[in-house]
Image (cartoon, rainbow, N blue to C red):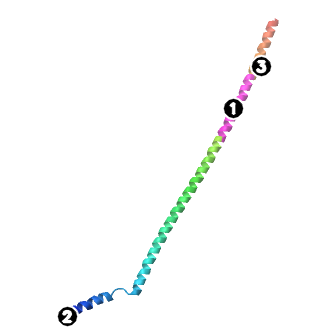
Amino acid sequence: MKKVFATLLIVASMSFIACGPSAEEQAKEKARQDSIAQAAQKMKDDSVAAAKEAEAKKLAETAHADSLAKGLIKDVKDAAKDAVNKAGDKAKEGADKVVEKAKEGANKAVEKAKEGAKK
């Protein structure tokens, strides 16, 4: 009886081993696994590329905004200088008019003083 059980045990274990996947099935499974790995890698690469592109776009937009801001600041500074120069010119014209009027007033006072001295 022991020989029968031993033979049955050997036959059963050989049938389990023989029931495993064939080389063709193993190759198909490996190809499927490789395909999944390639798809996952492609998704990762695409994601990284999209992130880099978004970062580059953000940097370009920031650089453009900085450039515009610098241009606006320069324009404001130039406008302020022009305004100061114009104000300075107006102030100088006003001061010249005041000096001119003062001279006229002084001349009139001198003439009146001369007339008063003649009398």
| Residue 75 on image: x %, y % | 65, 44
Above or below: residue 63 compared with residue 52: above
Near-viewer residue (26 or 104): 26
Near-viewer residue (14 or 118): 14
Q: Secondary structure at mark 2?
A: helix
Q: Residue furthest top?
A: 119
Q: Is residue 51 left or right of residue 108?
A: left
Q: Secondary structure at mark 3?
A: helix
Task: Please give the name of the residue rendered at 44% of the width and 80% of the height, measured from the top-left corner.
Answer: 31
Instruction: Choose the circle earlier in sequence order: 2 or 3.
Output: 2
Q: Pointer 1: what residue? A: 88
For disc 3, the neighbor class at 10 Å (few under 14, some 14 to 19, many from 20) is few
Residue 112, quarter of picture: top right
Give the number of the mark in front: 2 or 3: 2
Q: Is residue 95 left or right of residue 68?
A: right
- Name the residue type under label 1: Gly
Residue 104 numbered tag: 3
Residue 99, quarter of picture: top right
Task: Please give the name of the residue rendered at 44% of the width and 74% of the height, measured from the top-left corner.
Answer: 37
Q: Secondary structure at mark 1?
A: helix
Residue 3 numbered tag: 2
- Are the two marked residues, 2 and 1, in contact with CB atoms closer than 8 angstroms? no
Inter-mark Cα distance, 1 to 3: 24 Å
Instruction: Choose the circle earlier in sequence order: 2 or 1.
Output: 2
Point out the image quarter for the N terminus: bottom left
Instruction: Choose the circle earlier in sequence order: 1 or 3.
Output: 1
| Residue 7 on image: x %, y % | 23, 93
